[in-house]
Structure formats: C-alpha cells, structure tokens
Image (cartoon, helix red, strand yellow):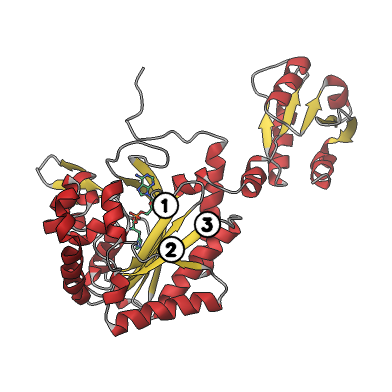
Amino acid sequence: MIRRAKGTRDILPPESRLWAAVEEQARSVFGGLSYEEIRLPVMEPTELFVRGVGEGTDIVSKEMFTFPDRKGRSLTLRPEGTAGVARAFIEEGLFQRPQPVRLLYIGPMFRYEKMQRGRYRQFAQIGIELLGAATPQADVEVLMALHMFLEALGFDDLVIRLNNLGDPEDRPRFIAGLKRELASHKDELCSDCHRRWDENPLRLLDCKVPRCRELMLNTTPVAEVVSDEARAHVEEVSAGLTALGIPVQSAPRLVRGLDYYLRTAFEIVSPHLGEDTAIGGGGRYDRLISDLGGPQVPGIGFAIGEDRLIDVLPSGFRDRVLGVRPVVVLPAADGAETAAMKLARSLVEHGLEVRNEVTGRSLRAGLKWAAKVGARAVVILGPDELAVGEATVRDMDSGEQRRVELERVAEELTAQD
Ligand code: HAM
C-alpha cells in the first residue's frame, strides 16, 4: 500500500464539509469588507522567502521544501502567503490600482516541521492582507475583520495577543539591551539560541526551550524601547479595538516567526491548543515590499491556520454543518429508475440534499442503507406508487409514511424544514 507523505492529511467527508463551510464564512465576512481573492502559485523562487521571510528564521533555515527544477533553478513550496502576495503586488503592478488593496487567500502552505497535534507539513491558511495603508485604522480594520470572522464561527474563547515590535531603527537598541541582560546567562542558552545570538537575536524571544524561556521572561520587553511614533501607533490600535468592544491582551514577549514584522504583531490563541500552537497570527510589514525591490508600500495582515481552526471549532457551528441529513430516493420497482432520477433532480433544485440509491438494492436493503447514511426521509418509488404517479415518503425518525403525488414531494419535504 502506498501511504501519504509524512505530515500531509486526507480530509475526508463529512469533515471536508466543515472546511467548505469555514471557507464560505471567510469569503462572506472578508468579502463583505472588500477583501478579494488572490490565487497565487504554491511554488515560488526560493529567493523570495529567503529575502521576504528572513534567512535567520526557522521557516527559512530549517522548514522549507526546496528543490531544483529540471533547469537547476531553486524553487520552494510556499511556507506562507505574505511573501507571495508582496511579489505579486510588485510584479502585477497592483500599486497602480486605487489604494489600499485588500486581498484574501485560502490555500495550502508547506513547512517541514516535526509532526504533532496541530502541526503538519502541508496545512492550509486563510489570510488577508491590506496593502497601501499605514494608519492605525488599517490595523484596526484587519483585527476587526479577524474578530468578525471568529465570531461568525461561534468562537467566544479565543484570545488576541498583541505586541509592539517597534520599527527596524529601534531594533539595534533593543537587541543591544537584550544581549546585555542575557550576557551573564549566555552559556545556559540552548544551541539554537547560540546561533540566534549572532544571526537573528530577536528570535531569542521565540525559543520554546523552558530554560531559555525563563531567562527571556526577565528581559525588558521590546515595546518599552520603541520610538514614540511606534508606541503611539500601537496604542491607537489598542484604543480603536477597545472602542469597538474587541478584547485584546497585551503580550510583551510575543515575537513572530517571520522577520518582516514591525510595530503591530499579534497572535490568536485558543485555550484548547496552548500558546505554542497559535490559531493564527499576523502584523504590520511596512518594509517588505520595498525590501523585495518594489515601491515603499506599507502592509498589514494575518493568516489563520485552517487545520487548527477546525480542530477547535465550536460545537454549534460543527453540528449545524454536519447535522444536514440527506433525503434518500429509492427506486423499488422495475422501470422506476428514470422517475427516481427526475425526482432527485427536482429535489436538488428545491435546495434539498439528495442521496440516490443506484446500486439496485431491494426495498428492505434500501431502507437499511438509508438509516445507515443518516437519511431524514426516504422517498420510495414502488410499483403501486408509480402506477398512480405518486411516491411514498417515509420519515426516518418517526417511521411515519405518507403517499404523496410526485410533483408535491419536494414541497412536502421542504415544508418540514
Ligand atoms: P504564521 O504565524 O507563520 O504567520 O502562520 C499563521 C498560522 O498558520 C499559524 O498561526 C498556524 O495556525 C498556521 N500554521 C503555521 N504552521 C503550521 C503547521 N506546520 N501546521 C499547521 N498550521 C500551521 C504567517 O504565515 C504570516 N504569513 C501571517 C501574516 C499574514 N502576516 C501578515 N500577513
């Protein structure tokens, strides 16, 4: 037997319905705020992520699926969506459109990670990006959109954790202070942190090793050493969210696993998954597009991990989606097939979900099968019924049966809804 590649998943029905329903909700909420879908390649030149996400990040240094194409060019399966959006923004001249540009993407991402709950090598993200607006109001809108989406799915226990990473100009000062504070404990840091120390010291704050974490807790938060402008920006974002009744938690030691963030950075965590397994994250990236050779265009956005989101989906939403039960159409007479197929067509046109019996089961076996697939009703087309242009409609919960004219079956079944 050939097995799926490690870290990939098969999303089977009926679970796949949840995915479709969540995506539909995303299109509805984000679409309502004019975030329009962009469909991007899943493979990009490796250099895009090296320059965009950052060479010293775990994603780029350890987690990319990178391979040469047949001409020896290095390609990478996208580990995230923002760098691709920025590339397309430059390459497709989206800066020439009326600004700001609002984009939505839904699709697979790839990271070579150790497998554990909520951590896959192929996973899906739902993300939005708002490009061309540098104001705190842009951040407020993006976070409001996030909150609206999560509320529409019925979440009431997710927490938005917000930090201020300051501007790139604030970094050297922060990093010098951080290193000073950690200097006497440097030999206690893990080997990864020793590498980070020189290559990408901000990442020290992101280490998951308990002793490193403990040491980081005693350092001065980055938000305390940022410029007045950066401070005012994130304070305004916080105040804007509070005014909208959107709760956010301050997270002074939150840094993100990608290098492009400045000022606003946030994550969404669930009490069911813990802080290391965020449902989503995002922030502002005002230098990304110019760093990739484009114009000076600011941006902010986030991505939600769809696998994780579905893992902790509120039961109300789950039950509503998975609770839809089909109507079985069961031809139980010679020559009933066409009448059954016509009936199925008409029921679907009336918005019902139909499951046809097409394997030639007898009435008895057909009813058994209908119970197994969770049918709410079975429409039986037996010889007696067919002779007078009727069908028997059986309610599978009460066991009650009624004879109904064929033209009235749809009406009868939709009336019950
Ligand atoms: P990220 O925090 O790297 O941000 O990923 C966003 C979300 O993707 C995570 O919070 C998580 O839910 C999900 N995710 C990441 N890795 C995995 C994995 N191995 N298995 C399952 N889910 C995973 C970004 O990717 C940024 N591009 C977000 C962004 C958009 N920032 C600005 N705009």
- Residue 360 appears in the picture as rendered: yes
Of helix, strand and loop, which one carries label 2?
A: strand
Mark 1 sits on what residue? Answer: 275
Q: Position of residue 372 (x, y in %)?
A: 69, 24
Instruction: Answer yes or no: disc 2 within 8 Å of ligand 1.
Output: no
Q: Residues within 10 Å of mark 2 (few under 14, many from 20)?
A: some
Above or below 162: residue 216? above
Of 331 and 183, the residue lying toward us: 183
The amino acid beneath tag 1 is Glu
Of helix, strand and loop, which one carries label 3?
A: loop
Q: Earlier in the sequence, mark 1 or mark 2?
A: 2
The amino acid beneath tag 2 is Arg
Mark 2 sits on what residue? Answer: 161
Tell me whether circle 1 and circle 2 mark residues in contact (CB < 8 Å).
yes
How far is the residue under mark 1 from the one under mark 3? 11 Å
Q: Earlier in the sequence, mark 1 or mark 3?
A: 3
Q: Is residue 9 left or right of residue 316?
A: left
Q: Residues within 10 Å of mark 3 (few under 14, many from 20)?
A: some
Of 262 and 307, the residue lying toward us: 262
At 83% from the left edge and 47% from the top edge, which residue is drawn? 415
